[in-house]
Amino acid sequence: MFTSLNIDDMPRAIRDLASSGAQAIAVPSRRLFLQVATIGIAGFAIGCTEASPEAEKAGGKLVNDFVRLGADNTVTVIIKHLDKGQGIATGLAMIVAEELGASMSQLKYEYAPANVQKYANTLLGVQGTGGSSGISNSYTQLRQAGAGAKAMLVAAAAKAWGVSGAEITVSEGVLSHASGKKATFGEMAVAAGQQKPPAIEALVLKDPKTFTIIGKPQHRLDSKAKTDGTMMFTQDVVRPNMVVAVIARAPKFGGTVASFDATETRKVKDVVDVIQVPRGIAVLAKSTWAAMQGRAALKVEWDLSKAETRSSSTLLAEYKELAQKPGDSARKDGDVDAALKGAAKTVNAAFTFPFLAHATMEPMNAVVEYKPGQGAEIWSGHQIQTLDQMNAATVLGLKPEQVRLNTLMAGGSFGRRGVPDSDYVVEACSIAKATGGKFPVKLIWTREDDMQGGRYRPIAYHELSGGLDATGKLVAWKQRIVVQSFMKGTPFESMIQGKIDPSTVEGASDMVYDIPNTAFDVHTPVNGVPTLWWRSVGHTHTAHAVEAFMDQMAKEAGADPLEFRRKLLAKDPRRLAVLNLAAEKAEWGKPLGAGRGRGIAVHKSFGSYVAQVAEVTVKDGAIKVDRVVCAVDCGVAVNPDQIAAQMEGGIGYGLCAALYSKLTLTDGAVDQTNFDGYRVLRFSEMPVVEVHIVPSAEPPSGAGEPGVPPIGPAVANAVFAATGKMLTDMPFGEALQA
């Protein structure tokens, strides 16, 4: 089957902002498409695995692949996903604790080794984090792991006490019997590890009505370490005899090294070596500063004969020209052309979206220790461990199992660390290999490196036409999308269904508004700019175009935007419910006064439904977002505080894209270098955000990305309400001044 999921998430606290909430710089995510057979929960084994030597020394006992019981009464949960600020480690540990009967104060976590057989994402088929699937793919699996560990503890206590296991209760990390006998998990850890793991079919999971941890707001397990500076990021890793490397890369995508002169570079104090690698010229030094100074002194002649040399304006002009022709059909219902021709009123609109950088707080980095022919060890914020391990092994001439990955907390990703070719990990490996493993190598990408030579959300262009009958009913919707494909030219090209890359049309072609005649098609032009999934992927532009155009249609129909949507969503109760909740909490219809407006948008992505109402003030051509009310239905809310944080972060990030962020090319070279040119939201610009979570018994769905898509159109619609002008070219923060 095809499994299409996004790889994304937004940090609520990034190192120095440990507990301040995602009300700052919001940064992106991504989407991974893999053609895999979905791994069923039945394939999960609770079988015991040997603990690592380090864990055994600490008195820990790994009773199954996900749970280690410590003699000190700690419970360590093995996390198969990457926590890049989204709080997934806490959420996953909570699930185990609920079924195990542990207290939150007992919990610790550590990242799993690269082992796809044990730690595959059950929705992606690889070990990796993406598609806002961290909780959803692990929920049942970790409940079973917790219940299995509990059963082994109870069996150990029953044997030691000579009682029936049915008579033993477990609460807050303590096993108790009516006779007065008690034992902590730590006291029973070794004995529990000697018990036969129970069969999955024999496990009895808790009734959700009895949950004491799941569904209750919990503090993040990593807050203290982030606050006191003990949290380890890749940037903090120091190995004996380690060198720091930076790479001089071509100024235009597709450029290669023609020749270079490192004479001046080698004169820089503490520069150790200069090496040509496939991606450019690496400068190795004893410090980051020395490496950067050495690179600045490097003289390189670049071969740009095969490089991308078009500017953003040129690409957009070509996209607009393409949009005048029919594209590949993604969906067609009824006869949209006839319906438009016969409509009482028609509306046309076009929306443009620029390239966007991921701009993670911690730029890309990796540390590699390589022993030729023997193995390698890598430290990094590994988002897709399976791919990083395989790609590293290929470069180093090793078997995947000879490459040990150490996954560390990452300062954001938003899609950037989930790269199919593991670009920065591969670069670090290529440098280590070129040195013959002489010393450990820490590769560092500067902010400028990633801004000018990274991966981006692609330019997108939408043209829409809508038709209303004489009663104001929406009877026709035609949408043409022009956007680069993530999949073409990559190992994932086989994911393209017919001629359609699903990530180019998601959020539009799967529209559920009840419109009798619709047509969606897409053009996927090719250019040399490397693109990548970016927090909420295709939904970042499709949701905006759909929801902003919906307000234009409502105005032409003489209808209130909320009521107009309600009539079209009668067959989608969950979407309608979040729409109504957001409107109710925002006091939809209450006058705001001159120069102010209120806009609404609703969207489903990654299995979750999100509606947002934005209130804005427009004054002297400037837009200020004052308040955002958000309603979300993401199934079972494991940690409501974490979900609220993800919505807040998604709103902050989405506002960056809607109001300010834009990456441009001039003759193929990226113009922006840092945050002075790539504008993001300031702390002072973050609106008041209210998050309302719909109580649900449905299986958990995504939270990392679904908060992003509705905010742009909600703000656009609020400006439309305040001024009568629909802003269609992103970003539009200063568009009213034009």
Image: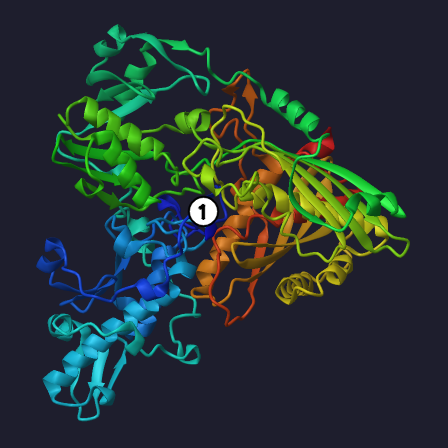
Q: Position of residue 29 (x, y in %)?
A: 47, 43
Mark 1 crowd level (few <14, some 14–19, many ≥20, 10 Å Cα): many
From the viewer's side, name the closer residue of 442 and 321. 321
Q: Position of residue 217 (x, y in %)?
A: 43, 66
For image coordinates 31% across by 11% down, the residue present is 298
The quarter of the picture where the C terminus appears is: top right
Q: Position of residue 487 (x, y in %)?
A: 48, 36
Exactly how many numbered labels are in the figure?
1
Circle 1 residue: 8
- Residue 236 picture quarter: top left
Report whether residue 156 is seen: yes
Relative placement, left or right, of 248 versus 337 is left
For image coordinates 43% across by 55% down, the residue present is 133
Relative placement, left or right, of 339 versus 147 is right
Q: Position of residue 516 (x, y in %)?
A: 76, 55
For image coordinates 66% across by 40% down, the residue present is 521
Mark 1 secondary-structure assignment? loop
User: Hey, what amino acid is under mark 1?
Assistant: Asp
